[in-house]
Image (spheres, helix red, strand yellow):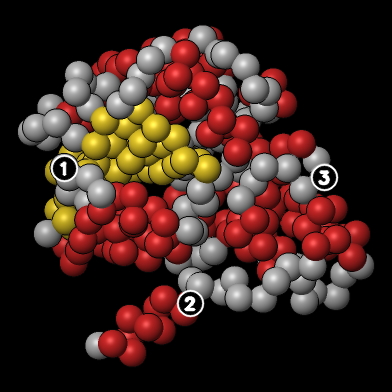
Amino acid sequence: MFWCILVKLLRFTMFNKIMDKEIYEKITKRKQFSQLRKIDVELAWEHFENKQLSLEEKIKSTRNLLGKSFVMFTSKRFLKDKVFEADWILKRHSSTSERFDHYSEIYSRIFSRLKGNFTVFDLGAGVNAFSVKYLPPKTKYIGVESIGQLSKISKIYFKENKLNNMESYHLSLFELDKIISLIKKNKNNLVFLFKVLDSLEFLKKGYSKFLLKELSPYVDFFVISFAMKSLVKKRDFKVDRRWILDAFPKEFVLLDQFEIANEKYFIFSKK
């Protein structure tokens, strides 16, 4: 059993070799990549490092993959250290704009299934931190985000509005030990993973299942969501997500699933 666990951990702990500093600086020269957690940049680079491509082609391909995983959820106007009004940013940010008119309904549907006061860990939060006013009273909120600029503006928003029960951490979702350490300090833990798992799979196939399983001993409930249509062309995604439902009989209990504003939600608990 020990060796089985060890092998699984080794599969997703592949960051022992140090990335060439010059290559890293070239990849992150663009503003939208400049404050990404290094572990995410390294994972993207690994996809192309050993391919028969020129260095510039490898760097370009790495940036394209990072753009597919992260930058589609932001734009330069949100990468500034300034105070943003919550509704303004939720309406305009691509990851939350469709959800904006339905926050009350979504959170009501989620929390009507759950009893007590919760600590919400919003993993891959993006700007969803600006939706905290729609959460039930006495909810503690902790956002985790790899894009440093988005984590920073969330902190500014919390501070300016004296939201002392809200926090934001600049971490990659591949920094699992650090995330588990945060979660273990709290009780009644609820994890949000909104439109996040597809992006994780771009960087490391199979990591979504691993993440959920590793978090489950410390988390009471999960809420995950998937975009049902592309953000730009509004076409249906042709992505096989049956693994989510296949996982429930073995690992989790499915409590509810629903679709609102082109987003499919699953609420589940550990067995």
Crowd class of label 3 (few under 14; some 14 to 19; many from 20; radius 10 Å) = few
Q: Which mark is residue 6?
A: none
Of label 1 and label 3, which has the lower sequence position?
3
Q: Which residue is mark 1?
A: 188
Residue at 18% of width from left, 66% of height from top? 250
* Tag 3: amino acid: Lys
Crowd class of label 2 (few under 14; some 14 to 19; many from 20; radius 10 Å) = few
Q: Say which element carries label 2.
A: helix
| Lateral position of residue 36 relative to residue 164, left or right | right
* Tag 1: amino acid: Asn
Above or below: residue 239 compared with residue 214: above
Nearer the camera: disc 2 or disc 3: 3
Residue at 34% of width from left, 49% of height from top? 182
Crowd class of label 1 (few under 14; some 14 to 19; many from 20; radius 10 Å) = some
Nearer the camera: disc 2 or disc 1: 1
Residue at 33% of width from left, 23% of height from top? 164
Of label 2 and label 1, which has the lower sequence position?
2
Q: Is 259 or 44 nearer to us in this picture?
A: 44
* Tag 2: amino acid: Arg
Q: Which mark is residue 11?
A: 2
Q: Say which element carries label 3.
A: loop
Above or below: residue 100 compared with residue 74: above
Distance between mark 2 and mark 1 Cα atoms: 30 Å
Q: Position of residue 70 (x, y in %)?
A: 61, 42
Q: Which residue is mark 3?
A: 29
